[in-house]
Amino acid sequence: MKQSEIKELSVAELQEKLSESKKSYSDLKMAHAVSPLDNPIQLRTLRRDVARIATELTKRELK
């Protein structure tokens, strides 16, 4: 998910996306621990998406 897409979402949508992304990241991480993923780069992109969303939520709270 791109930063420009994240900025367009509302706070409620961001919180929903954050919880979805965290869940899918933990699921992928567990699957990767059991057997290697075909594309392990997915872990990095999901982790970075979680960070981007969390950062945007923090920015909006501080405003």
Image (spheres, rainbow, N blue to C red):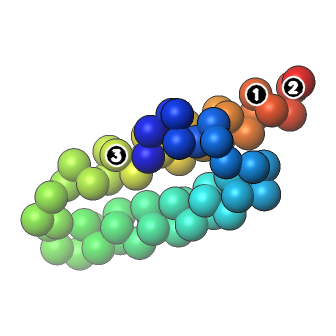
**Label 2 element class:** helix
Residue 9 image offset from top left, x and y in percent? 67, 48
CB under 8 Å between callouts 3 and 2?
Answer: no
* Residue 29 located left or right of residue 2: left
Q: For the point 35% across and 63% down, which residue is it?
A: 29
**Label 1 element class:** helix
| Among the two numbered marks 3 and 1 on one chain, the one whose residue lies closer to the N terminus | 3
Q: For the point 19% across and 55% down, which residue is it?
A: 40
* Residue 2 located left or right of residue 63: left
For the residues labelled 3 and 1, the Cα–Cα distance comes to 21 Å
Q: For the point 78% across and 57% down, which residue is it?
A: 12
62 over 4 or under it: above or below:
above
Mark 2, residue position: 62
The residue nearer to you, when weighing 9 against 21, is: 9
Q: Residues within 10 Å of mark 1 (few under 14, many from 20)?
A: few
Mark 3, residue position: 45
59 over 35 or under it: above or below:
above
For the residues labelled 1 and 2, the Cα–Cα distance comes to 5 Å
| Among the two numbered marks 3 and 2 on one chain, the one whose residue lies closer to the N terminus | 3
Q: Amino acid at mark 1?
A: Lys
Q: Amino acid at mark 2?
A: Leu
* Residue 36 located left or right of residue 58: left
The residue nearer to you, when weighing 1 against 39, is: 1
* Residue 7 located left or right of residue 12: left
As drawn, the label of residue 28 is: none
